[in-house]
Each structure stands twice: as C-alpha cells, then as structure tokens.
Image: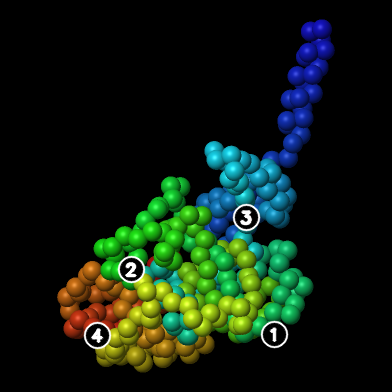
Amino acid sequence: MRPLLLTILLALSLSALAAPAPFFLWQSKVDGHLTCAQVSPGDGWIRFTGPFRDAGCRVAHDAPVRSRSENAMQYLVSPVGIVRSCFKEKFAIPRQPHLASAARGVLELLPPFDQGEAVQGLEQVSHVWLLFLFHQALEDKPRLKVRPPRLGGNQSVGVFSTRATHRPNGIGQSVVRLDKVEPGRLHLSGIDLLDGTPVLDIKPYVPYADCVSDAHNAMADAAPRLIPVDWHGDALSSAHQHAQRLSEPLVELIEQCLAQDPRPAYQQPEPERRYGARFWDLDVHWHYPELGRIRVLDVQMTSRN
C-alpha cells in the first residue's frame, strides 16, 4: 500500500512540474508598450493583466469563476490595441472626445488583430467607438459617488451619472474620427485618450442608431465655455517650428485644449502661477494674466522621461 501511495504522490508532483507556467501581459513604464511573457522582461515593466494559458495572452488561464455573489461572474479581458496619443499626461486632456479636433493619435493593434483581416471594411466608416481602460485610475475598491470636474469638484453624485475616470471596472468609451485605416494601425483624431491607453474593443459608429436627436442631460447640457488664448513673446513661433518638425497641428492642439480652461474649477489662479502640460514631446507652460484668459508662455522640448 505504501509504495502505491508514494507512486501516486510522485505522479502528482511530476504532473504539477510538467504544467506550463502561465503567461502575463507586461506593460512598459516608459512608453506603455505591452508584451506577453511568463516572466517580467526586465526592469521598467509592470504586470498588466493575466494569467493566460497561451503565448499570445488571449486565453484566460482559468475559466470564469463565481465571485462572492452567487449570481455575479468575473471575466478576464485583454486589450486589442494600445493608443499612441498626443497626450502624455492627464492634465489638459479634453473632458470629452471631439472637443479638440487637432488631438490626434494612432491605435496600434495587438496580435492577432494586427492583421489586415481584422479591419477589413472599416475604411467605409468615418467614426468609431473605442471601449478602453482608464489604466492610470484603476482601483481595487469601487466608488459609489464621485466629484466630477464639471461640477467644480465640490459636489458628489452617483458614479453612474457621470463619465468620471474612477469607476467600476475602469472602462471608458469615446467616439473618435477615423482618419486612415492600415493593417494593424488606425489613425484617429478628436481623441481624449492618454498615451498608452489600452483599448478593449472597436465598434463602428452607426449614425441612425447612435445619434439620438431628442437626448438630453441636465448635468452636461453644453460643451465647456471657451476662454481666449494668446501667446507670449516667441512662444508662438516656437510652436510653429515644432509643428513642422512633428507634422502635427500643434498650435491648434494647444489652443483648442487650453481654451477649455483645464485648471480645476475651484482654483482661483494668480497671474504669477505657471501651469504646464505635455503635448507630444513638448512641455507647454501658461498662466492666467486675468481670470478667464490664458497666455502661453513657452513651448519647449521636454526633459522628462
């Protein structure tokens, strides 16, 4: 009996050792790039999601499991692509899509969706819905109420009545203009997405179904009121030079984003206080010479990683 028991235990041990190690998606801290591997590619990488059974990080390691609520299910999803955006940090990103038409980026599709078959027919579409993750605002404990910036940050409302970034599952959605379709790459404009944003799904915009003529929202009934933006000294000529280098509408991007007054609504800025944000590889600084008006002070190559 004892030799039989030892044989069974040895077989179980060998079976466990033979089982392949799971795969994980790892994200670069530098540029947000994702790669699938069983172990970290090295310093500067963080575990993004997993585990998976396959080397493409497409098949969840375990089947969906029941949560503490008997009727609730947990599902593991993985990105279909990553956005390479003009916005390198959250500050000064428009609060909704299409508020800055000069905001451009590229959605780089991940395997196996980087093949031409996945986007065949999409050239017939002018706009797409992107379902994405607020990857820099994911939280373990869900919030029931949030303080949306539109209300000045001082009034809390139910999370489902807003599009706040801090929300259950961290999922956002944006409708953006589709400028060009290439195998593995979608060129976008009018975006409100941070560089490195993981995209979970892409859906074509259907005008007759998605445009609701009699829709209303008393909390957000109009776009933000725009304020004037002017330029100090050589800031405008510097912006034009960098626009040529980048082949991007940089001046328009800066003006469109700053005209929406990105500061928190509760702040009363003093003229000597400088604000800054990063667009593409540039640091842009501005101040408020008076409340309700912005002056761009300088546009410089960023020194930050």
- In 3D space, how far apart are the residues under numbered discs 2 and 3 (Cα atoms)? 29 Å
Of discs 2 and 3, which sits in the foreground?
2
User: Looking at the rendered structure, which numbered label has been put on residue 149?
Assistant: 2
- Amino acid of disc 1: Gln
Nearest to the observer: residue 277 or residue 255: 255
Q: Which mark is residue 160?
A: none
C-beta proximity under 8 Å, tags 4 and 2: no
- Relative placement, left or right, of 8 versus 187 is right
Q: Tell me if 106 is positioned left or right of 148 in this view.
A: right
C-alpha span from label 4 to label 1: 41 Å
Q: Secondary structure at mark 1?
A: helix
Q: CA distance from mark 1 to mark 3?
A: 28 Å
Query: Which quarter of the image is occupied by the N terminus?
Result: top right
Residue drawn where x is 62% and y is 66% of the image: 201
Label 2 packing within 10 angstroms: few (<14), some (14-19), many (20+):
some
Q: Nearer the viewer, mark 3 or mark 4?
A: 3
